[in-house]
Image (cartoon, helix red, strand yellow):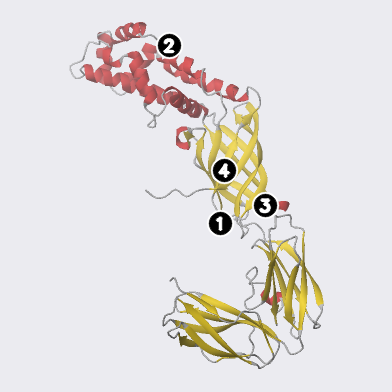
Amino acid sequence: MSASIAFTLKGPVKLEPGQLLSLTVVTTPPADYEVNFRLIGESLDASLSLARGVADAKGAVNFALRAPTQATTFAVRASIKDGPSADLLILVSEQGFSTLHVIPHYEGGRAVDSWVAHAAPGVTCASLADTLPDDPEGALGVVGTPEKPLFLTDAPVGPYFAVVVRAGRFAWGCSDLTDLTPGTIREVEVHVINKPLDTTVNTLGLVLELTPEPSGWAKLLDEPRAAMTQTFTSLGSEPQTLLAAMLSNSPALKSFAENHGWLAALEARYALAPTSPAEWLAAWQAMTVEEPPQIRGNLHSLDDAHALFSLEAIGALGSGSTGAPTDYLMTLGVAPNDVLQLGGELFLLPSRYVGAVLEQAVLPGSSDGGAVPQHLATLVGCSELGFTVAPDCNADCVAALCATGLKNLWNEALDVSASANKAASLPLKASGKASFDDDAALTGFNGSWLGQVQCGVDTIKVSGDAKAIVAVPVPPK
């Protein structure tokens, strides 16, 4: 709805107890809108002449307010049906009015850009406790800055007050006030405390920069690199190892292969190749995987002490490529001064990580995990082996056996860390200054982390920057 509504009288309006006040609201643009009226806040025995009216041709509705018989503050609210509303603040006192100089006392350490103060009549801080930091309706209010004093002018003398001060919705306080004197300035000190950070609202995108001790990262990966290469010579020579892999799922062909010189033909083929699979792997592994990766994922708090970390990537690699679990339970807490503390343990299969990085480095753009086996099949020349074909296995069948054998060997190489029970663990502790929104919901942190990578008997100290921001939701496909 594009309409608006406003009182013709500007507030706040001072009244004597029981005084009658004529009021008019005007809607824009003029139309026969239905307008509803009600009293907001501590209106006591005040009354309205209309609960509902229809705007005339000029968009106006006239009605009357009878002030209560006791001192208070409240508001008259006029609302277009299913549309906007407007409030008029009413101040009632027979004895006169006072000015409140509200002084926030805040040692919470959070950046405060502005203060909002209200004086709610006829209530206590205890009765308002469950509603804070919502502003009390119908109360006298003012907005200020830390450099500008907060003055609530024209507080009615007579009722007692709850004086509430807040910074956004992340810090607030309240003080009870009685015995106002007309025509004076009363100082009101309000002690303001922080709302505890809410860690459960937002999912955070967490980034851990990994900086190991010198030479540590390469040292950690030396053993799985060598073991992966040795997979292709595990039966003595590369041709012997490949032939066994080719025939592992075709036992009926073993006798035929022995009687028709398949091993000799494969050895001759290897001799013609510019480089063998094992040599190629060794050469490329020496040229890759030197840069420590960045760890990325999403962190979602489960309660006030635990969070679920969902690993997205280690470096440029998705979590599934590295043999690492996807989800990890971590501890999550907030220390004094809004310092976030995170603890947990991640896992990694080094051989899976080496293989995935090698595939991306050597054959970029591959995403199906089949690029390395395909390249190895090209090196060997699987389609040009020159075997004596069997009655039930022609040249295409032989080429397929070769490609499948190399793929199986590559998968075995990827799993050497798992086969040797040498998964790498990464216990870590991170901490950093938290950021938050106006409702004290955690929106991130910026700090550092410490840990160590443990693989077998090797332990490498690591550290780095730790950063988190609110994760951007991925739209459904």
Nearer to me, 384 or 133: 133
Which of pointers 4 and 1 lies earlier in the amino acid sequence?
1
Front in this rendered view, residue 28 or 395: 28
Residue type at mark 2?
Answer: Gly
Residue at the location (35% across, 22% down)? 374
Q: How many neighbours does mark 1 have within 10 angstroms: few (below 14), some (14-19), or many (20 or more)?
A: some
Q: Which mark is residue 334?
A: 3
Q: Is residue 468 above or below residue 319?
A: below
**Amino acid at dot 1:** Val
Neighbour class for label 4 at 10 Å: few (<14), some, many (≥20)?
Answer: many
Question: Which of the marked residues, 2 or 1, is nearer the chain's N terminus?
Answer: 1
Residue 199 spot, x, y in % from top left:
60, 54
Going 44% across and 27% down the picture, which residue do you hit? 360
Q: Quadrant of residue 231?
A: top left
Question: Camera-side residue: 313 or 140?
Answer: 140
Of mark 3 and mark 1, the one earlier in the sequence is 1
Residue 126: tell me if it is visible.
Answer: yes
Nearest-to-viewer mark from 2 and 4: 4
Residue 467 sits in quarter? top right
Residue 247 showing in the rendered view: no
Q: Secondary structure at mark 3?
A: strand
Q: CA distance from mark 2 to mark 4?
A: 46 Å
Q: Badge 2: how crowded within 10 Å, few (<14), some, or many (20+)?
A: few
Which residue position is annotated with label 1? 201
Quadrant of res 172: bottom right
Q: Nearer the viewer, mark 2 or mark 3?
A: 3
User: Earlier along the polypeptide chain: callout 2 or callout 4?
Assistant: 4
Report the residue marked by disc 4.
206
- Closest to the observer: 384 or 448? 448
User: Which of the two labelled residues, at mark 2 and mark 3, occupies the earlier sequence position?
Assistant: 2
Label 2 secondary element: loop
